[in-house]
Image (spheres, helix red, strand yellow):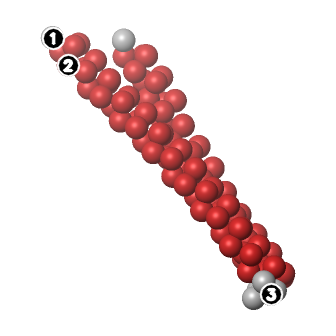
Amino acid sequence: MNTQNNTNIGLQWFQERCRQANASFNVAVGFAGATALLSIVVAISVSMGKTSEATAAAALGLTSGAVSVYCFKLSDDANKRLDAAVKELLNEE
């Protein structure tokens, strides 16, 4: 009976890690979409003459760079936790 409880706890833990990895991916996709939208807004602003090219390039470079780094780190951390959870779950059985 104790083994069954451990398996249930392990399965719940694994499912939670999968949920976290999925949420991390969704956040990364959301940030990528927001960056694309910002790019379009800045392009329109430059074409209308409301923003200089240098300011637009700097804003997009900083924003997209920061978002990319954050998204890759978030996704990488979630995947590493998921891999570790799989290894632990397989070792317990």
Report the residue that reaches farthest toward the front.
48
Quarter in which the C terminus is drawn? top left
- Alpha carbon distance from label 2 to label 3: 65 Å
Q: Is residue 56 above or below residue 27?
A: below
Q: Which amino acid does label 1 sit on?
A: Met
- What residue sits right under mark 1 in the picture? 1
Circle 2 SS class = helix
Comparing marks 2 and 3, which lies closer to the viewer?
Answer: 3
* Location of residue 44 by image quarter: bottom right
Q: Which amino acid does label 2 sit on?
A: Asn
Q: Is residue 70 visible?
A: no
- What residue sits right under mark 3 in the picture? 49
Are the two marked residues, 2 and 1, in contact with CB atoms closer than 8 angstroms? Answer: yes
Are the two marked residues, 1 and 3, in contact with CB atoms closer than 8 angstroms? Answer: no
Q: Is residue 78 above or below residue 14?
A: below
Q: Which amino acid does label 3 sit on?
A: Gly
| Spot occupied by residue 92 in the image (x, y as percentages of width and height) | 37, 16
Circle 3 SS class = loop
For disc 1, the neighbor class at 10 Å (few under 14, some 14 to 19, many from 20) is few
Circle on res. 5: 2
Q: Can residue 88 be seen in this view?
A: yes
| Spot occupied by residue 25 in the image (x, y as percentages of width and height) | 53, 44
